[in-house]
Amino acid sequence: MSARPLLRMSDAANGILAAAGLVVVAALTATSFGAAARLALEGFLVGIWGFYVLQLTDTLMALGARDGRASVPEATIDLIAVIVPLVGFLFASTRDQSLYCGVWLLKPLRHSTFFRLLGRVVSRAAPNLIGVTSLFGIVLFGASLVAYLIERDIQPEKFGSIPQAMWWAVVTLSTTGYGDEIPQTLGGRVLAGLVMMSGIGIFALWAGILATGFFEEVRRQDFVRNWQLVAAVPLFEKLGSAAFVEIVRALRPRVVPAGAIICRKGEAGDQMFFIVEGRVSIATPSPTPIELGPGSFFGEMALITGEPRSATVSAATEVSLLSLYSEDFQMLSSSNPEIADVIRKTADERRGVAPRH
Ligand code: CMP
């Protein structure tokens, strides 16, 4: 029997297993256990290691099959998680053997979308991050040099060289302030104040660059995903590229579970919906409810007439929707009257009104 079902565990479960192993590694260094307890904990580590051997086999097989289930970085992490503890077991002293399992810290990275996102953010923001890091280096060196000049005669044991003063500058610039090196002169204290303020500014710049990078990356991903969803709606096929970009920005994706009510009869409606995948059921007065599927839209009547919702609409299956708010519908109407016309005509037909010409 293939071991794959066992190995198809979720990333969260994988992370919990690695965390449990690391807790045991830490516990083995912190407390003096009796021989039996120590053996049991080490046995637990061996169990995790055995599981990682199976996982590595699975990853390597998937990599060999090129079925897209495994990547080289993933396989590298799986290999390190097996090899390093094995090396520790074979060559390290008994006391240090379990420490080699510390490489399991890498395990949560193997599939993590967050770390991939972080990598993209850092590489895109690299020029600005390098700029701020250079500024950090300039302030650090400048502050160390001035502190050395001011304090060297009074505290030669702490500020007797630029490298010594640099430790003080790092601690001050990061506003950590261990208090092991304190300027004694007035000039030194004024300098310390300036360095602290520069530090706050530099860390704020780093945080700002990363926060903006994350925001832009998530927005870019949303845009690409929306693009694919909007392309699946036939009504938008005829749009020119500029109008398409406009509508991609305007539509908001939403997934509704089967059975959930999307809009209720009698409520005010400020948005309409396009179905990308799945089906919705519309409770009209007719004996059988009307079902709509991918490519259709609903909720347009309230948007056009300003009247309350004419029927309750619920998700017949899990349904992926794109919603268009009334202000964006106005924008679409003025830039693409043909699409707005199709929507208006459909609304008229559904209400049983003769289409306007
Ligand atoms: P609205 O009235 O905003 O909210 C309920 C929606 O159900 C309505 O817009 C239409 O999109 C849809 N709807 C109502 N009646 C019908 C019908 N007879 N056929 C198809 N769709 C309908």
Image (cartoon, rainbow, N blue to C red):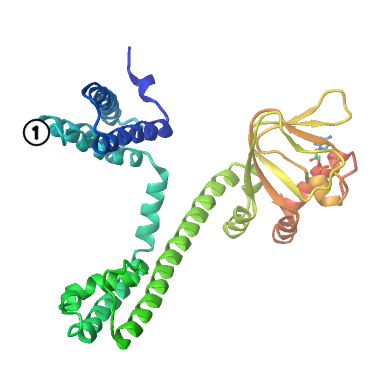
Of residues 196 and 324, the one nearer the viewer is 196
Q: Residue furthest top?
A: 1
What amino acid is found at the position of numbered circle 1 in the picture? Phe
Please identify the quadrant where the N terminus is shown. Answer: top left
Of residues 94 and 103, the one nearer the viewer is 94
**In the rendered view, would you say 184 is above or below 287?**
below
Q: Residue furthest left?
A: 91
Where is ligand 1, by quadrant? Answer: top right
Residue 76 seen in the current view: no
Of residues 251 and 241, the one nearer the viewer is 251
Name the secondary structure under disc 1.
Answer: helix
**In the rendered view, would you say 316 is above or below 108?**
above
Q: Is residue 278 left or right of residue 189?
A: right
Residue 325 seen in the current view: yes
Task: Choose top left, top right, bottom left or bottom right for residue 84.
Answer: top left
In the rendering, at what x and y percent does residue 57 appear? 25, 25
**In the rendered view, would you say 127 is above or below 195?**
above
Of residues 348 and 284, the one nearer the viewer is 284
In the rendering, at what x and y percent does residue 48 appear? 29, 26
Residue at image coords 38%, 48%: 116
Q: Is residue 332 left or right of residue 108?
A: right
Residue at image coords 22%, 83%: 151
Residue at image coords 74%, 33%: 314
Residue indicated by mark 1: 91
In the rendering, at what x and y percent does residue 73 appear? 28, 41
In the rendering, at what x and y percent does residue 158 appear? 19, 74
